[in-house]
Amino acid sequence: MRSISYSKALSEALHEEMIRDESVFILGEDMGLMGSVFGLTKGFMTEFGAQRVIDTPISESGFTGMAVGAAIRGLRPVVELMYVDFATVCMDPIANQAAKMRYMTGGQINVPMVIRAPGGAGRRNAGQHSQSLESLFTHIPGLKVMAPGTPYDAKGMLKTAIRDDDPVIFIEHKILYAQKGEVPEEEYTIPMGKADLKRPGKDVTIITYSREVLFALEAARELEKEGIDAEVLDLRTLVPLDWEAIETSVKKTHRVVVVSEAVKRNGFASEISAQIMEGVFDYLDAPVKRVAAKNVVPPFSPPLEDCFFPGVKDIIEGVKEVIK
């Protein structure tokens, strides 16, 4: 099977869906002539035209609101927020309009739109361009939230998101754009709400998503050298959550470490930990351990930023804490 980058996988998903369905269009800052700030849509404007590849002003609230209206009228917009941090300036169209429209109209109106939101730390982009804000979206009923960690998952999940009839927040870790992995050339999609067991194990379950999947797999390989067999469960979709996969893994290993790049306080790792404590407490041989980012603004300084988000060493320490 061919190996392509995470960004190429996303680009292919967008391209294939725009060919398959003429109601799909993309919009955001620098999406047209520049081909997006990360180069995902180079050549798209030439192929599809300015009506389906829209360069917007620097007004996230404006073009996100426009996308909500377009979705209500039967189109399938795919919005790119240059950074997930910028979602904070357009929460009204996201949280009060897109998320609530189906409910508020008794199911008469759907909002089939995707908001692609590059997030995460590691690029020395400082506090306003390095956050992991997935918990903001998972807290809002009516939004679906996806966070792929591999090129294979990125392509299959984005195609599923575009075809879904509800608003989907699609979080892409910026550091993953250059990561390569096997992606089939033939058509495929990945069901929403299905976690993926990236590595089976029997001693402890590491539950994570997005870039931290790579760290968790590396940590598991290091732990294996010390006789600790760690299972790595990639949630992939945060809402809807694959509780069955979590429950099955916890009942097998009896120990859990939940890993997230978001800050620890009120992060998504806390939600997973709470659900495990409420749902399968009797199967636990140790308290659930959270491994997450420090409760500070993401630093610009490279040494400080590397200490800010959890890495392989932090996961290993977390696993050893629950094992003992």
Image (tube, rainbow, N blue to C red):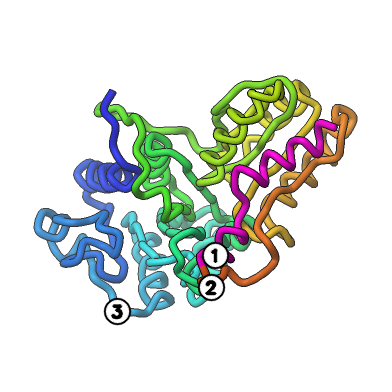
User: For residue 63, which numbered disc appears in the image?
Assistant: none
Q: Main secondary structure of the magenta part?
A: helix
Q: Nearer the viewer, residue 200 or 82?
A: 200
Q: Quadrant of residue 69?
A: bottom left
Amino acid on which disc 3 is placed: Pro
The residue labelled by disc 2 is 127
The residue located at (28%, 74%) in the rendering is: 56
The residue labelled by disc 3 is 57
Furthest residue toward right: 282
Callout 1: helix, strand or loop? loop
The residue located at (55%, 63%) in the rendering is: 303
User: For residue 131, which numbered disc appears in the image?
Assistant: 1
Q: Nearer the viewer, residue 81 or 322?
A: 322
Q: Give yes or no for residue 304 being in the magenta stretch.
A: yes
Instruction: Give the tally of numbered discs.
Output: 3
Q: What range of the chain is rendered magenta? A: 302-324
Mark 1 or mark 3, which is nearer the start of the sequence? 3
Spatial distance from mark 3 to mark 1, Cα to Cα?
23 Å
Mark 3 or mark 2, which is nearer the start of the sequence? 3
The residue located at (56%, 37%) in the rendering is: 193
Spatial distance from mark 1 to mark 2, Cα to Cα?
7 Å
Q: Position of residue 214 (x, y in %)?
A: 51, 39
Q: Give yes or no for residue 309 being in the magenta stretch.
A: yes
Q: Nearer the viewer, residue 63 or 235?
A: 235
Evaluate if marks 3 and 1 touch, with contact meaning CB atoms under 8 Å apart.
no
Evaluate if marks 1 and 2 touch, with contact meaning CB atoms under 8 Å apart.
yes
The residue located at (42%, 37%) in the rendering is: 153
Q: Position of residue 170 (x, y in %)?
A: 46, 52
Amino acid on which disc 2 is placed: Gly
